[in-house]
Amino acid sequence: MRLPTTTILIEPAMNATGAPKHVGMALLAAASTALPFAVGIIKNGLLEVLLLAPVVWFLVASRTRDGAERVLLLLVSLCLTLTVCDLALRPVITSRLHYSPMNQHQRRLPALPMLGRWDALVDVSRSVYGDLAAMAGVPAFREPRVVEFRTDSLGFRNDSMQAPVDTIVLGDSFAAGVGVTQSGTFAQTLATRYGRSVYNLSYPGGPYDQYVNFSIEVSKLAIVPGAQLIWTLYTGNDLDDAGGETWEIGALPWRTGFSAMLVDYRTFRDRSPLRQIQDALWSRWRGISKDVLIRSLPDGRPVLFYGPQEVWGDRARAEAERHPNFPKLLKTLRAMKEAVTRNNVRATIMILPTKGEVYRWLLNPRSPDEVARPSGFSEAVLDACQQLTMHCLDSAPFLREEAKRLFAASSELLWWRDDTHMNEQGHRALASFLLQEILQPVDGGG
């Protein structure tokens, strides 16, 4: 009698968890490939998907599994090495990857990531150069200077000061004093030279961001009744800033808990030094940006301008008022008027010109300085302020005259040659303009 045939299945070797060994190895490899993305070395999620291809190959391979395993081990080693290097380099090399500590220490506000802050309680002093020199990527264009940069517990650029506050400075990178040492900003000059008690609430961003910053932070300040708010608007790019969609502070997209923690995590990823090195190499490979305009002083020193900002110095008022963001700017002005009234603050808007508006003879020698006229942006804002009964000043005429005087006396400028921002002499001129127009020295200042 013949016995029935029995099929014997040979089970693959199992690991301690009961899963095939190659499955466990594949899971470990997949987790390893995710590490460069997790720490920010890889920004694009599609590249992370591509890294998983060797894992898939290893799982489905049969005859070529040995080769797939070697590739997988190499991939895991590479991912782990890059991740460890990225984490180890953060405290060592990060400052060298930024031309200014103000770029290095920027972050999103966890509770409201539409806004930015600097890291709290920063205190650094280091050599920097200008944003236009950084864009150009040509070391010969740099105008090195040592900058002290300090922030308070809220992440704004302030030293310790005595309350109550009688002057609030609000604005973008110009009012924050990007490129200038701490004591050289016009906010600090008003405090140290003219005896004002100043809080600088400025951070790079547009008028809408500044309105929201004022609205959510002013209650944290000990301000005197009738304190003076100096709000700077910049001709060069404020209309290019789209701003937000709601002016009701309680209706803003606030975040709490895990959602707010994710914002901090994104900041962590953005600070990957290896990715920043990649970006720098890519920028250098592209060469000098066409947006950087290069001119020369009579003595041959290079002076750089930023084209996209300088076009606003020549645009007419009608162009500014037709801009799709102009209605938003008007709404922001109205909302700010209500906010300062609620907080018993007197507000003055100071319009800042572009570098080329003040040095038109240098940017465009065919356009004589004698025919300089107000920018269309300033005309539009001045008219809007008049209709809203808000105090508004155009600083351009004063700065042009001061620029002429300074250049005739010393061949120096009010702006850094390699930067879109003013130097310390420019900030002193702004402080003088404000003292002349709206402020008075106190406590023997001046």
Image (spheres, rainbow, N blue to C red):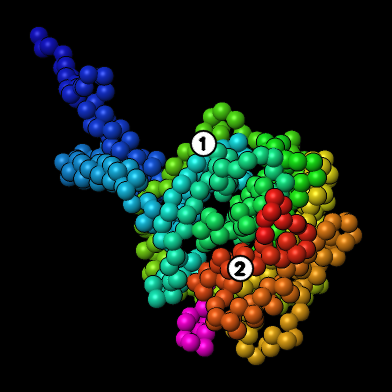
Q: Which mark is residue 426?
A: 2
The kind of residue tagged 1 is: Leu
Residue at 47% x, 58% y is 147
Kindly tell me whether residue 307 is visible in this rendering: yes
Q: CA distance from mark 2 to mark 1?
A: 40 Å
Residue at 64% x, 77% y is 403
Residue at 62% x, 88% y is 365
Dot 1 surroundings within 10 Å: few (below 14), some, or many (20 or more)?
some
Q: Which residue is mark 1?
A: 262
Front residue of this view, candidates 6 and 435 = 435
Q: Nearer the viewer, mark 2 or mark 1?
A: 2
Whether 223 is drawn above or below 429: the answer is: above
Kindly tell me whether residue 329 is visible in this rendering: no
Q: Position of residue 254 (x, y in %)?
A: 65, 35
* Screen quadrant of the N terminus: top left
The reply, left or right, for residue 98 in relation to residue 355 is: left
Q: Position of residue 399 (x, y in %)?
A: 68, 73
Front residue of this view, candidates 418 and 224 = 224
Whether 406 is drawn above or below 19: the answer is: below
Q: Position of residue 366 (x, y in %)?
A: 65, 90
Q: Which mark is residue 399?
A: none
* Screen quadrant of the C terminus: bottom right
Task: Please report the bounds of the magenta region as a residue range.
Answer: 291-303
Which callout, 2 or 1, points at the residue further toward the start of the chain? 1
